[in-house]
Amino acid sequence: MGMRIGRAPAGRIPADGSPVGRTPDSRREQVAALLRSPWWRGAAALLAGALPALAFPAPSLWWFAYVALVPWLLLIRAAPTARRAALDGWLGGIGFVIAVHHWLVPSLHVFIVVLAALLGLLWAPWGLLVARLLGGPPSGRRCALAVAAVPAGWLMIELVRSWEGLGGPWGLLGASQWEFAPALRVASVGGVWLVSLLVLAVNTAVALLLVTPRARTAAAASLVACALAVGAVWAWAPQPERTGQVRIAVVQPGVVDGTGSVERRLARSAELTRGLAGQDVDLVVWGESSVGVDLTHSPASAARIAELSREVGAEVLVNADARQTDGSERTGIFKSAVLVGPDGPTGARYDKMRLVPFGEYVPLRSLLGWATSVGKAAGEDRLRGTRPVVMDVPGAEGLRIGPLVCFESAFPDMSRRLTRDGAQVLIAQSSTSTFQHSWAPAQHASLGALRAAESGRPMVHATLTGVSAVYGPQGERVGSPLGTDASTAAVFDVPLATGTTLYVRFGDWAVYAALALLAALLAAEGTRLLRRPAPERPAPPARTVHGSPERPGH
């Protein structure tokens, strides 16, 4: 039986080889038709806002951050009205918040949607800003302004949501660049804030490249300017000077569940610590909540850890999650970094100052206390410490450490303050066991690279169940991280450094510069509106007298 070859439908085949009826113009028209539907457009905004999550660990596609926002920017630019642009910004913000914090779903359940909807409102004004600067035929001047102002607007969102009560600075776009050395050098100049500005500037310039040929020259010039700025920072920014090293051991007991888990975790930590004897370590670090009692009122537990200190020949930095008193009239549950030496607690103690909303306290508990019934919100509010503490480690030749607890490592100002107070090594004690099989452990550990690069001081991120990691004073990784499947103790040769980075010296200047730019832009826009001439009123119709128009003056 012969094979019959069918004929193509009548009509010409396009020169580009695309199927009949599927020309590039028709495909664009189909996409435009879909986006005219509010439901499809809303779904597109949610998806576009979620895309940057892929730049963070665990996927850690750091390079993707530089183009991840382009679809969202183009969608907002094409908004037919200002109201639609604000809505696209809001929906994209919801997608971003949920995607970056999706590992909170098992703990917060449907409440995360409520939080995302509230936080997403921060992106609505940004949507208006994007539409104003990217919409319409872009001139060279307007392109340059967009490359500066759109990132500045985004940075204001990051600044507002960095407030502890709104969840803290988790998922700052600049934090996605934790393993990109040039970006870490930028962080040493202006902190993670300057890195966020850089990432947004590149995204904005790429979006402009795709808009019209008229915008491409200015957009290409903006990309070149970004590259030159990074090159200048790489060559010119002062860097810390290496001054030796210190041997720090991280003890990670791993997952311990079930009845008596606190005691069994302590026993496993003790076992791993004993194995460090003879390795000439200067300090042993345990993770967050590694001790479940107040050592000042538990002589047996304090003596047990002191014995470990004698066996290893180094102080042990533990973390007590227990009902304690802070030496004043306040008594309650504190999370405290406590340094224990051969003779027991040395008296050096730091109480966690910034608490995880809903995880360690419920904001406005009288109003939002119902969150405890739909998730794993804190049944009792933890108490806060009142000041940062730099600890002297007696057995390590004058080593000074700056402890942080849990998500305090996300706050740039805290590590900067400890560095200014004389800390030689930053230490974060953490536990993300609740989110063990999610992206959270890797995301949390990556923050140590940013804090190290900003401060010019090494950082040790020690956890109960992984990921534990150590970073040098330029944010470079030291040794191999301890993954979430490890139950072990590891010794790291941590490089020490002196010198002051520009971020430690000048702080959040990038934030203030962005704020000043937006203020100037608003002032210019207000002045333009005031100078706009009032629309001329139409002349009143001529009156008719005895069937003929009445002429003026008669």
Image: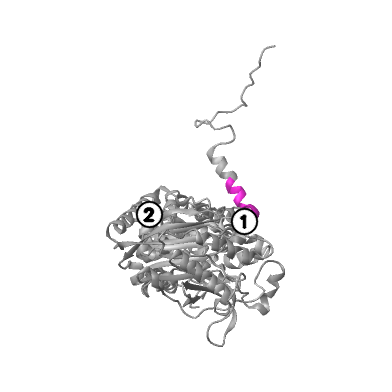
Residue reaching furthest to the right: 373
Residue reaching furthest to the left: 236
Residue reaching furthest to the top: 1
Which amino acid lies under the numbered mark 2 shown in the image of this protein? Ala
Residue 355, image x and y in percent? Answer: 55, 73
Q: Left or right: 498 with respect to 325? A: left
Residue 276, can we see it? yes
Residue 496, image x and y in percent? Answer: 34, 63
- Magenta span contains residue 415: no
Which amino acid lies under the numbered mark 1 shown in the image of this protein? Gly
Q: For label 1, count other residues whose C-alpha is less than 10 Å away and answer few (under 14), some (14-19) or many (20+).
A: some
Q: Secondary structure at mark 1?
A: helix
User: Which residue in the structure is indicated by mark 2?
Assistant: 181
Viewer-proximal residue, 378 or 29? 378
Q: For label 2, count other residues whose C-alpha is less than 10 Å away and answer few (under 14), some (14-19) or many (20+).
A: some
User: Which residue in the structure is indicated by mark 1?
Assistant: 42
Residue 532, can we see it? no
Residue 489, image x and y in percent? Answer: 50, 57
What's the CA distance linking mark 1 and mark 2? 37 Å
Viewer-proximal residue, 41 or 243? 243
Q: Is residue 244 above or below residue 32?
A: below
Secondary structure mostly seen in the magenta stretch? helix
Quadrant in the rendering for residue 439: bottom right
Viewer-proximal residue, 206 or 262? 262
Viewer-proximal residue, 380 or 302? 302
Q: Secondary structure at mark 2?
A: helix
Q: Is residue 405 above or below residue 257?
A: below
Q: From the viewer's perspective, is the residue at label 1 or at label 2 nearer?
A: 2
**What segment is highlighted magenta in the picture?**
31-40
